Image (cartoon, helix red, strand yellow):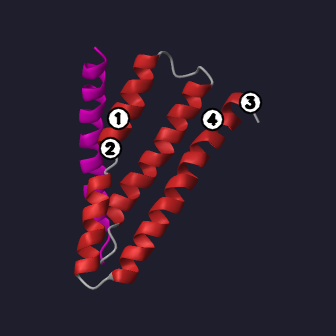
Amino acid sequence: MNYLIIALGGGIGSALRYAVSKFVQDSTNGAFPYHTFAVNIAGCLLIGLFYGLAARGHLGNNTTTLLLTTGLCGGFTTFSTFCNENIALLRGDNAFTALVYVASSVFCGLLAVMLGYLIIDLIVSGR
């Protein structure tokens, strides 16, 4: 049953990734892959929110956690595309852009997960 729950979340996450990525790609230009960056940072924020809720017992049972984290967030974010885009940047003589993309993705991703946890802390504590 867990596999079906994860597959459902993954399907929803993949469709959302396509929609968000397309929207951002249609709204930006340049060598920097803003569309994948936006999806991955949003996914980091979401997983921080979901695990923050789960850690405090506010997300329901393990099935809900699997649906939203492994399923939805796993289908929504895309590490393989991130890596492929960096190889394309490097092969296109855009080493500096690749470096900025990797560094900002890691930094902003960590920051977004931490922000997700902090948002849940503020909501749960009522501050």
Q: Distance between the residues labelled 3 and 1?
A: 26 Å
Closer to the observer: label 2 or label 3?
2
Three-letter code, disc 1: Leu
Q: In this view, does 96 lie above or below 103?
A: below
**Residue pushed farthest bottom?**
93
Question: Which residue is at 52% across, 22% downward?
Answer: 59
Q: How far apart are marks 1 and 2 (CA)?
A: 6 Å
Closer to the observer: label 3 or label 1?
1
Dominant secondary structure of the residues highlighted in magenta in the image: helix
Q: Which of marks 2 and 3 is nearer the N terminus?
A: 2
Badge number at residue 24: none
Three-letter code, disc 4: Ile
Q: Which of marks 4 and 3 is nearer the N terminus?
A: 4
Residue linked to disc 3: 125
Residue linked to disc 2: 76
Badge 1 density bin: few <14, some 14–19, many ≥20, Cα 10 Å: many
Magenta residues span 1-30
Q: Earlier in the sequence, mark 3 or mark 1?
A: 1
Task: Classify mark 2: helix, strand or loop.
Answer: helix
Residue linked to disc 1: 72
Task: Classify mark 1: helix, strand or loop.
Answer: helix
Task: Classify mark 3: helix, strand or loop.
Answer: helix
**Tags 1 and 2 touching, CB below 8 Å:** yes
Q: Distance between the residues labelled 2 and 3?
A: 29 Å
Report whether 13 appears left or right of 126. Answer: left
Rendered location of residue 74, percent (x, y): 34, 39
